[in-house]
Image (cartoon, rainbow, N blue to C red):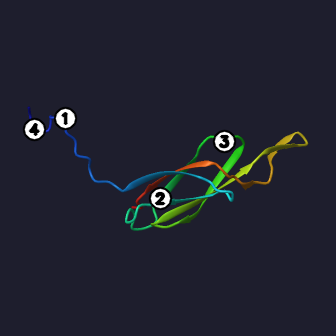
Amino acid sequence: MAAGTDGSYARPPGPRVEAARGVTDGSGNVTFTWPPGAFAAPPVVTIGLQGAAGFRVHSITGNTAAATTVNVQASTGVTLLGIGVLAVGGPAAGVTVHAHAVAAP
């Protein structure tokens, strides 16, 4: 067999990537703790909220090389004079949150 055609593959080095999943507490918060030494600086984090009824919004409220904290708020739709608007939001407890963290360039 010719060199380089044996089916083996060596992944080129790239940034460190971590993934985690958690559930929000009664205040709508969830904290993701990254493995020790995974990141030298706060990572770039993307968040996904797992399906839930109603409107959900999230914000990253803290991000360090060791941990990332996310807050999730929920709101219901209200019709006012025939116009749909969102009611005041509140903490969304029990929402599953997915996080992907990549080492910052």
Q: Which of marks 4 and 2 is nearer the N terminus?
A: 4
For marks 3 and 1, give the one nearer the viewer. Answer: 3
From the image, tell me which residue sits under label 1.
Answer: 7
Q: Which residue is found at the position 42% from the left and 54% from the top?
A: 18
Horizontal and vertical percent for residue 35?
Answer: 41, 61
Q: Which one is nearer the viewer's eye here, 85 or 61? A: 61
Identity, as a three-letter code, of the amino acid under mark 3: Ala
Q: In this view, does 92 lie to the left or right of 69?
A: right
Horizontal and vertical percent for residue 60?
Answer: 58, 60
Q: Which residue is found at the position 77% from the left and 45% from the top?
A: 76
From the image, tell me which residue sits under label 2.
Answer: 44
Which residue lies most toward the right here?
81
Horizontal and vertical percent for residue 1?
Answer: 8, 32
From the image, tell me which residue sits under label 3.
Answer: 52
How dense is the environment of label 1, judged by Cα within 10 Å: few (below 14), some, or many (20 and up)? few
For marks 2 and 1, give the one nearer the viewer. Answer: 1
